[in-house]
Amino acid sequence: MIGRKAQSWATENYGEGVQNDISDDSRLNMTGDARPLEQEGPNVSSTSILSGASEILALFRILGEGYRLSCLYRCQDALDVYNKLPHKLYHSEWVLSQYSLEGMDVYSTVLYHLKEDMKLSYLAQELVSTDRLAPQSWCAMGNCYSLQKDHETALKNFQRAVQLNPRFAYGHTLCGHEYVALEDFESAIKSYQSALRVDARHYNAWYGLGMIYLRQEKFEFSEHHFRMAVGINRHSSVIMSYIGTALHALTRNEEALEAMELAIIADKKTPLPMYQKALSL
């Protein structure tokens, strides 16, 4: 892979740099007096330095590969890579986001979809008590109200998150979801567009726009936005399925069935693509 080639290139050049530094230091030492370098301090060989540097680079390679895979939404692959880390490093704050609010907004959405209302309520209260100025705290609170079908209060909480951090893309997207629930599609479109101005790779916003245009029967716009979303998250069977729905509405039936078949292959446990394929047939 390109990444691995780049990493090996960096390792080789880093090693060369260490060797050059060692040789330069040796020459400088010998100009002062004739005593060998070992007598001036601890006996550290170039081999041990290179060995230590290689170990550090190997750890950074694992961390970088795991982060790359998570950015591609290949979550299981990312977990498999992180599992190669030593125990202490695996349980570090950066890897686990431990004792940190980073990622808690997404976790609250997971609890929302699982309908874990008690866990979600507890999480929201804990986050707000920990840091009332963190947008993630108010996203969790908003998801809590959204699960209870109180969409107006949920929207106020998501708006609070965006107020605290206007560049919080996920907060804008969650506002858009609540506007859709309230059937205020114009405001929903503006929220999704705000999210994309902050982060053009925020596939949730592309998906949200696709769903609005699908409901408005603007099927070509819908297909375009779904394809933008799946171009970022290539493993979402739900998005693939809705691409098929849009294509079916455009009477491009062969393409629709192909898209739905890809969705079924992507996740055989999800019933949506099979249902959509049945409707198309």
Image (tube, rainbow, N blue to C red):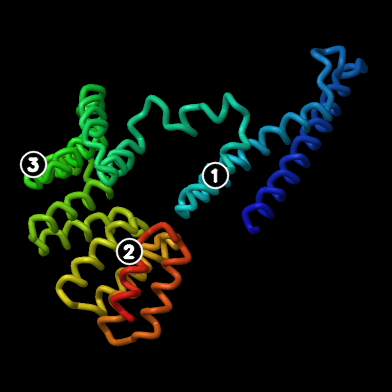
Of the residues under marks 2 and 1, which one precedes in the sequence?
Answer: 1
Could you tell me which residue is drawn at 17 percent across and 50 percent down? 175
Of the residues under marks 2 and 3, which one precedes in the sequence?
Answer: 3
For mark 3, does the 10 Å Cα neighbourhood hold few (<14), some (14 to 19), or many (20 or more) residues?
some
Looking at the rendered structure, the secondary structure element under dot 2 is helix
User: Which residue is identified by label 2?
Assistant: 272
Q: Quadrant of the C terminus?
A: bottom left
Alpha carbon distance from label 2 to label 1: 30 Å
Residue 146 falls in image quadrant:
top left
**What is the number of the mark on residue 153?**
3
Q: Is residue 161 placed above or below 235 in the rendered structure?
A: above
User: Which residue is identified by label 1?
Assistant: 66
Query: Could you tell me the amino acid type at mark 2?
Result: Leu
Q: Is residue 24 placed above or below 260 in the rendered structure?
A: above
For mark 1, does the 10 Å Cα neighbourhood hold few (<14), some (14 to 19), or many (20 or more) residues?
many
Judged by depth in the image, the label closer to the viewer, 2 or 1, is: 2
Alpha carbon distance from label 2 to label 3: 30 Å
Could you tell me which residue is drawn at 76 percent across and 39 percent down? 15
Of the residues under marks 1 and 3, which one precedes in the sequence?
Answer: 1
Query: Could you tell me the amino acid type at mark 3?
Result: Thr
Left or right, 149 with reference to 255: left
Left or right, 106 with reference to 53: left
Picture coordinates of residue 30, whole percent (x, y): 88, 23
Alpha carbon distance from label 1 to label 3: 37 Å
Residue 264 falls in image quadrant:
bottom left
Between 197 and 183, the one lying in front of the other is 183
